[in-house]
Amino acid sequence: MGSLFVEEKCIGYYSSRDRILLVGEGDFSFALSLATAFGDASNMVATSLDSEGMLEVKYMSSARANVALLKLKGCTILHEVDALTMSQHPNLRHRVFDRIAYNFPHAGFVGREDNSYQISLHKEVVGGFLRNGRNMLTEKGEIHVTHKTEYPYSEWEIVKLGQDAGLKLTGIESFNVHAYPGYVNRRGAGNRSYETFRVGTSCTYKQWRSLKVLAGGAGIFLIKFGFYVRVKNTVRVESNNNNAKVSVRLIEKKTFFLK
Ligand SMILES: C[S@@+](CC[C@H](N)C(=O)[O-])C[C@H]1O[C@@H](n2cnc3c(N)ncnc32)[C@H](O)[C@@H]1O
């Protein structure tokens, strides 16, 4: 006799019961890792900024093979989806998701990673992703950004970017690349797009939609005092990752001048 219940399958921070949107995929191996764990991927939409042709140039046959397997599992694949405008994409405009994830966002290699202009480009991509994603979440939905935490990547101020987008941070979890069998994190830009990179002490920042009005209220309260306010967010993350203890201290600072 058939069962009325569909078994929930989980991998990493993701469940087969979630409607999942993946943004900025490289060779689609992360999407395939989730889809393989779930068996059925009809609740998933996996997207790349790259066109089909560009994927072929960057990753040769690997992206094509991954995309073909994803389609067999019912996953919707969309190319040329820009994180900065994705909420207006014709195939996404009317949809909401329980999880929206972007692993290792990166704006491409313009300068050195510690160059302030290069950092501002990365922040534009992540900020745009978070602002768009905020409008595409279910009530209890989460946006995930997986990112390196050491300098100069710490300069991106992911938590602050989330706050600016009207999101509330609900957690920072250490990221274990081995939790996603088959996933190969790719550089995704430059003449070594195909290559992977060391994830180091990367974390998944989980941001939850919050009410914009709360941020406005806090602003009015502070403006009354008319002085410089230095805001420091310190988040300590500790986790047992494959028996290796990972401890990360993230500090994000911002100075506001209030008239
Ligand atoms: C470091 S790679 C990571 C790729 C993949 N997420 C992974 O983990 O293997 C950065 C990715 O961000 C994508 N990207 C850059 N700008 C983007 C944008 N505005 N919208 C969506 N994706 C973008 C690139 O095409 C590239 O695939």
Image (cartoon, rainbow, N blue to C red):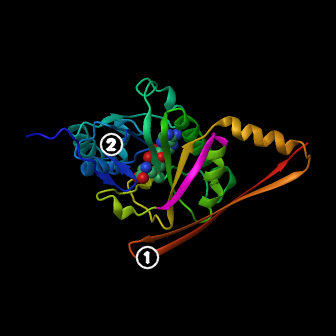
- Which quadrant is home to the C terminus? top right
Report if residue 107 is visible in the image. Answer: no
How far from the left and from the top, in percent, is residue 116?
69, 54
As drawn, the label of residue 59 is none
Q: Is residue 257 left or right of residue 97?
A: right
How far from the left and from the top, in percent, is residue 64?
27, 43
Identify the secondary structure beneath mark 2: loop
Residue depicted at 29% across the width and 57% down the height:
182
Q: CA distance from mark 2 to mark 1?
A: 30 Å
Report if residue 208 is visible in the image. Answer: yes
Span shown in magenta: 164-174
Residue depicted at 20% across the width and 38% down the height:
72
Q: Is residue 108 left or right of residue 94?
A: right
How far from the left and from the top, in percent, is residue 153?
59, 59
Q: Badge 1 is on which residue?
A: 244
Question: Residue 130 is drawn in which quadrant?
Answer: top right
Residue nearest the viewer, comparing 35 with 60: 35
Residue nearest the viewer, comparing 98 with 33: 98
Q: Is residue 239 above or below residue 87?
A: below
Was residue 166 drawn as part of the magenta stretch in this picture? yes
Q: Give the amino acid at mark 2.
A: Arg
Q: Give the amino acid at mark 1.
A: Ala
Q: Badge 2 is on which residue?
A: 17
| Of callouts 2 and 1, the N-terminal one | 2
Identify the secondary structure beneath mark 1: strand
Q: Residues within 10 Å of mark 2 (few under 14, many from 20)?
A: some
- Which quadrant is home to the N terminus? top left
Question: Residue 249 is drawn in which quadrant?
Answer: bottom right
